[in-house]
């Protein structure tokens, strides 16, 4: 643990991270992009545990977008292999830390090996109560909203009386809104991440590339979040 007094800080319930900059991190070092993904995924484990230990209840990680299938076959294949390893090899890490793992995203066109590893991890961790990690994999915000609309249309539910809260139940996961959204690597965009859930999120855009974004960098994000005045359209709160 670092030297930051968390009792003085506001802890967001739901943090989202757009895991970005792996490729540039590798390039800076004269390495192939896939080495950046290896480093990024290694960092993901420790960082996720730290964030949940600090009192965050839900952590949504954008690890692969629906658009990322446009990348070179070699890179996509490497990432799919990393997912299988991450989900299979870290069961004890999630179990020892009482973490429930859920996923958001479409199945198609994920390889069968990834789907199987994903489903086994979900099943094994489903009764854990020490925090939730929501892997957004083959995820797109528009796809999620479109899929919800289709489910609603097919369900025959009365749409005239439907509220925002009712709509949420049709999303991939029934989770609270994002409070703090972090995108590493200095890019200033959402790239189709959790469009519904990010409506009132506080945004934080560190320049650090994801493989170098560690515990102390997360502390800085929380310090910044604590200083924000969240008004939700109301009056100033100070
Ligand atoms: C993000 O890093 C990781 C995934 C998309 C899985 P990038 O691969 O986008 O890295 P940059 O943005 O090219 O540096
Ligand atoms: C968004 O990052 C998707 C993930 C981090 C998984 P990208 O690197 O794919 O986004 P763009 O292309 O820069 O918008
Ligand atoms: Mg990127």
Image (cartoon, rainbow, N blue to C red):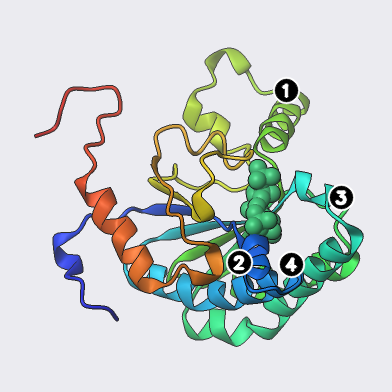
Which residue position is annotated with label 4? 33
Element carrying mark 2: helix
Residue 228 as seen in the image, left or right of residue 131: left
Residue shown at 63%/37% (left/top)? Answer: 170
- Image location (x, y in percent) of residue 184: 50, 55
Residue that sits furthest to the top in the current view: 160
Element carrying mark 1: loop
Task: Decide which of 218, 140 is in the foreground and name it.
Answer: 218
- Image location (x, y in percent) of residue 28: 62, 67
89 versus 198 height, above or below: below
Please state which of the two labelled residues, at mark 3 or mark 4, is closer to the viewer: 4
**3D distance between C-alphas at marks 3 and 4:** 24 Å
Element carrying mark 4: helix
Q: Tell me if the residue at label 4 has its CB under 8 Å from ligand 1.
A: yes
Please state which of the two labelled residues, at mark 2 or mark 1, is closer to the viewer: 2
Please state which of the two labelled residues, at mark 3 or mark 2, is closer to the viewer: 2
**3D distance between C-alphas at marks 3 and 2:** 29 Å
Which residue position is annotated with label 1? 156
| Residue contact between numbered discs 2 and 1, judged by CB atoms under 8 Å | no
Q: Earlier in the sequence, mark 2 or mark 1?
A: 2
Residue 25 circle label: 2
**3D distance between C-alphas at marks 2 and 1:** 49 Å
36 versus 10 height, above or below: below
**3D distance between C-alphas at marks 4 and 1:** 47 Å
Which residue position is annotated with label 3? 108
Residue shown at 69%/73% (left/top)? Answer: 30
Disc 2 crowd rating (10 Å Cα; few below 14, some 14-19, many 20+) is: many
Q: Earlier in the sequence, mark 1 or mark 3?
A: 3
């Amino acid at each position: 643990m670092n030297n930051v007094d968390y009792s003085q800080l506001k802890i967001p319930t739901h943090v989202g991270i757009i895991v970005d900059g792996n490729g540039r991190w590798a390039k800076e070092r004269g390495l192939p992009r896939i080495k950046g993904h290896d480093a990024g995924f290694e960092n993901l484990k420790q960082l996720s545990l730290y964030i949940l230990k600090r009192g965050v209840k839900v952590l949504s990680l954008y690890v692969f977008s629906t658009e990322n299938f446009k990348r070179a076959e070699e890179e996509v294949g490497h990432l799919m292999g990393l997912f299988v390893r991450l989900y299979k090899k870290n069961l004890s890490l999630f179990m020892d830390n009482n973490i429930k793992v859920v996923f958001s995203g479409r199945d198609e066109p994920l390889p069968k090996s990834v789907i199987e590893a994903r489903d086994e991890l979900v099943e094994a961790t489903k009764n854990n109560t020490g925090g939730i990690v929501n892997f957004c994999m083959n995820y797109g915000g528009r796809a999620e909203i479109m899929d919800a609309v289709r489910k609603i249309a097919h369900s025959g539910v009365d749409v005239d009386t439907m509220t925002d809260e009712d709509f949420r139940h049709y999303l991939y996961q029934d989770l609270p809104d994002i409070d703090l959204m972090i995108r590493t690597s200095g890019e200033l965009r959402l790239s189709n991440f959790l469009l519904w859930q990010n409506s009132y999120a506080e945004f934080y855009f560190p320049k650090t590339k994801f493989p170098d974004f560690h515990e102390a960098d997360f502390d800085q994000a929380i310090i910044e979040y604590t200083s924000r005045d969240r008004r939700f359209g109301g009056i100033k709160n100070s």
